[in-house]
Image (spheres, rainbow, N blue to C red):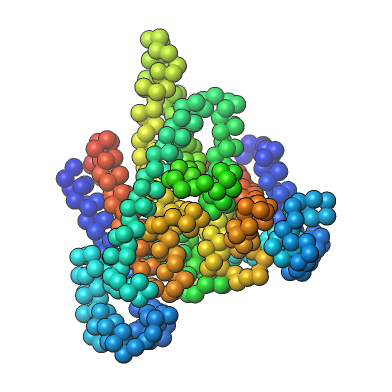
Amino acid sequence: MIAGVVRRVVGAIAVLLGSGTLAFAALRLIPGDPAATLLGGAPATPEAIARLNDELGLDRPLPVQYATFLGRAARGDLGWSFQYNAPVTEVLGQEIGPTARLTLTACALAAAGATALALLTAGRRVPRAVSGTVELVGSSTPTFWLGIMLLTLAGFRADGIWLPALTLAVPVGAVLAQVLRDGLETALSSPFVLTARTRGVADRRVRRAHALRHALIPALTVLGWTAGSLLAGAVVVESVFARPGVGRVAVEAVMAKDLPVVVGAVLLASVVYVVVNTLVDLAQLLVDPRLREV
Amino acid sequence: MTARRWRPGFVLALVAGAGLLALAVAPGVFAPYEPYRADPGAALMGPDGAHWFGTDQLGRDVLARVVHGARTSLAMGFGATGLALLAGTLVGLAAALNGGIVREGLMRAMDVLLSCPGLLLALVAVALIGPGTLGATLAVAVAATPEYARLVNAQVRQVRTSGHVEAGVALGLRPRALIVRHVLPNALGPVLVLATLGVGTAILYGAALSFLGLGPNPPAAEWGALLSDGRDHLESAWWVAFFPGLAITLSVIVVNVVGRELRGRHLR
């Protein structure tokens, strides 16, 4: 058990180290003079270039630069944004709140919708076919289109969080519903459900109290994927609804060639993604003893 | 193999897919008007008999623009998938054939790329490569590559130990002939099937980048860009944004239905 936990945590740290390396590579990959390019549209005054050279240590050997970069990133220092003329951490820090609210609300909506859909349709021929089609359409619809159409239908009153959260929740919920229903159907055909039924437990109770728990295990495995999709979707949804957030800042930074902000935002998303995945792995270790031996 | 069932949904998807490809190949045949010809007198007119999908802010026919958009949008999706497949095959093959430290290095690098949600990876890539049709396509390809590299690596390692490849080794076939003629064809089958599903994601990502203003430059007719155009006129003219989005959704549904059916038939 302890060995399994250690192995997964070490693996996660290795991946994060890799992400940091990649971020460093991305910042160094920019063609041309890094200092001038990094300044983007900002005037390349001697002070600005001097600050940048100091910031990135561009005059020092590459391994030193690399170590400095990783050391600073680990302490939460992601560099300097030229567009905002502020530390990247500060720029992103202000945006984390709105993005967290949006993604968590969407996550709750997706989970609730998917659970209801799966409970109602699992093992029933016609409802299953209908919901299968709904899920196919839901997972194939671009969020930016869905968002725009919902916005139009709602008469452009989108000051609340519900419309953007619903937009973000639809594609994720569609996939979750499929996974949950598959799990429910497997559970419904297993012997323990038959036992429950012979004891006279009502169908609704069999589904909710007995089968659902078993369907949650496969759903848990896609939780990491869910987190990733929500974070990526937030980029688009925040732009559609003109909401503040990490995603919108990242897109604006791409336009403004403010690479430190782009890399910082993506690094932040990667950290969340890796942490969620590792927690899911650890949770499965707790739930399923068979995994502990590997 | 049991008799193949031609499900109505699958047949419908194949027909719709053929239609979309026809639009992409010969848009001029299907488009009722020139996609770039402006007619300020007929700006933002709703769908009617003359303009089935209405007109945009410059009086351009939305149907004509959607039809002409098929080529760029589909080319971005298929092109990015093709490039990703090529790059993924090279990386996966190099990893599987070399083994040891090369494999560990390459595959761990792919794991790191996979630890970043696809669209965000594409966003970083487009920031590095630069926006535009080619830039966005390459960025989507970069985002899709690690998945294929992982699949090819696993497949090649599996096929390599199968009987007929060992027989080829015993017969003294040169390594290159062995890989090209015997290992790759067998390893790539399942990867190609899964790549069909990947095309749907690639179309979505490509359109998303265009929508965000990082794809083809205006006035290019491309679905994501058309949709983004229509955003400014939503209150008076919903159709300018509606129909390009419908086209994206339909294409992705078609690709997903075909991909799922192929997966069901050829993979367990």
Q: Position of residue B238 (x, y in %)?
A: 65, 51
Q: Quadrant of the N terminus of chain B?
A: top right
Q: How many marks?
A: 0
Measuring 21% from the left and 47% from the top, which residue is drawn there?
A4
Measuring 44% from the left and 18% from the top, which residue is drawn there?
A204
Q: Is residue A102 left or right of residue A275?
A: right
Front-most of B186 and B266? B266
Q: Is residue B179 left or right of residue A210?
A: right
Front-most of B127 and B99? B127
Q: Position of residue A211 (x, y in %)?
A: 39, 25
Residue B149 vs B16, above or below: the answer is below
Name which quarter of the figure residue B101 lies in. bottom left
Front-most of B50 and A25? B50
Measuring 59% from the left and 37% from the top, which residue is drawn there?
A133
Residue A11 vs A117, above or below: the answer is below
Q: Is residue A272 left or right of residue B96?
A: left
Residue furthest left in the image: A2
Q: Position of residue B26 (x, y in %)?
A: 77, 64
Residue B68 vs A82, above or below: the answer is above
Residue B6 vs B72, above or below: the answer is above
Name which quarter of the figure residue A40 lies in. bottom left
Q: Position of residue B89 (x, y in %)?
A: 49, 64
Q: Is residue B97 visible?
A: no
